[in-house]
Image (spheres, rainbow, N blue to C red):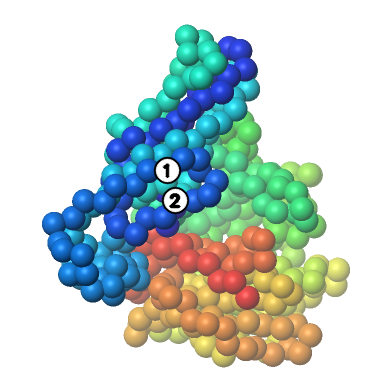
Amino acid sequence: MTSNLETNLRNLPRAAALLAAACAWAPLGVRAQDNVGSTALTVYSTTQPGAVPADLYRPLPGQGNVYNGQAVPGYAMIRQERTVDLKKGLNRLNFRDVAAYIDPTTVTFESLTAPDATRVIEQRFEFDLVSTDKLMQRYVDQVITVDQLAGDKVVPIKGKLYLVGGYVEGWQPTDEVHEYDPAAQQWRPLARLPTARGALAVGVLNGRIFAVGGVGRNGRNTTAHEAYDIAAGRWTSLSPLATARDHLAVAVLGGRLHALGGRIDGSYSRNLRANEVFDPAANRWEQRARMPTARSGIAAANLDGRIVVVGGEAPGGTFGEVEAYDPASDGWSNLPRLPTPRHGLGAVTLGGKLYVISGGPTPGGSSSAANEVFTP
């Protein structure tokens, strides 16, 4: 858990500023950090010295300031000063390691060198800033930039988002294809799919988007396999999928597409263990070692040279199984189970980790805001 005090400051000349948390409330046991300036701590309690067992001051995991089921009697008043140097113009200051239960109204700002030319534009305090829910709430309806580590540098992730096929109102398969440009904040239609379908899977390889399988407008599975050339703006029909199915997953590994799992004609009582590999150079599908667990509504991603398959659904419930395919041995292995079993989820690898996002916790039309990460 991280507490974060954020203040935007604008000043004209270069100035030094002083921030003082004059009356911050915090649980007992707070220790000042060496790098935060001068600190004064006054503890108030109605109990006698030694009357409270030491174990009560140890918080229960995941319960914040709750100590063995009850609040610790007493409170503390903290006065802390932090001195910073500001450059001319707009400055943003982020302070961490502050009391979790600080009263934001007691935080004051004072310029030591140019009080008339410096002012606070915005100030806010947020607890648990790094949780998924907090981040999502903070950036609703805003355009965000996602960064990733590339060696010792941080670089933004660039690109466009493509929406290919799927179902429209009334569970009707569509042939619509759309492209979203984050820079322009605009969607635009692209060339339509040759075969309208829902519950298909897509993968991107060498500048082409591959659309595999799904349910056609006749309500039955299709073996359609078509590739969209992003630069040329046109679709090409390729070798049909060996096993017609829907609610499958596609992952790219070693220059090939793996079509995994799925079900027959929309029925998750007819789940499959299929693992079929497409070689674009030969325009040919080949069979590989089948998945240990038959399932559909799954997600798959390439993690460190292995394809990891997560989630899924069946009549008996959702799957927490996580299984990894190694193309070198043509074999499968088990990884730690998904903490929240679900189907209809998404999976992506970033920075050597696997992120598993959203999905339904029960079979059928359910949903969640789950976001869990696996670190090898």
In the image, residue 157 above or below residue 113: below
Residue plotted at (67% across, 61% down): 351
Mark 2, Cα crowd under 10 Å, few <14 / some 14-19 / many 20+, is some
Task: Tell me if 215 is positioned left or right of 87 in this view.
Answer: left
- Type of amino acid under label 1: Thr
**What percent of the width, then of the height, locates residue 156?**
68, 44
Q: Nearer the viewer, residue 352 or 96?
A: 96
Q: Which residue does the image show at 36% across and 62% down from the upper left?
A: 368
Q: Are marks 1 and 2 in contact (CB under 8 Å)?
A: yes
Furthest residue to the front?
A: 49
**Image position of 75 with respect to 263: above or below:** above
Task: Classify 91 as above or below 88.
Answer: below
Residue farthest along the left direction in this orientation: 46
Residue found at the far top of this picture: 116
Give the mark nearer the N terminus: 1 vs 2.
2
User: Which of the two residues, 154 or 115, is positioned nearer the viewer here?
Assistant: 115
Quarter occupied by the C terminus: bottom right
Label 1 and label 2: CA atoms lie apart by 7 Å
Q: Nearer the viewer, residue 223 or 298?
A: 298
Residue 367 place in picture, x, y as percent: 36, 62
Q: Is residue 133 left or right of residue 96?
A: left
Instruction: Tell me if residue 184 can be seen.
Output: yes
Q: Secondary structure at mark 1?
A: strand
Image location (x, y in percent) of residue 109: 42, 25
Task: Report the residue marked by disc 1.
Answer: 39
Q: Amino acid at mark 2?
A: Ala
Residue under the point 58% across and 53% down: 164
Give the residue at mark 2: 32
| Image: 90 above or below 373 | above
SS under mark 2: loop
Classify mark 1: residues with Cα within 10 Å, few (<14), some (14-19) or many (20+).
Answer: some
**Left or right of 57: which side holds 247?**
right
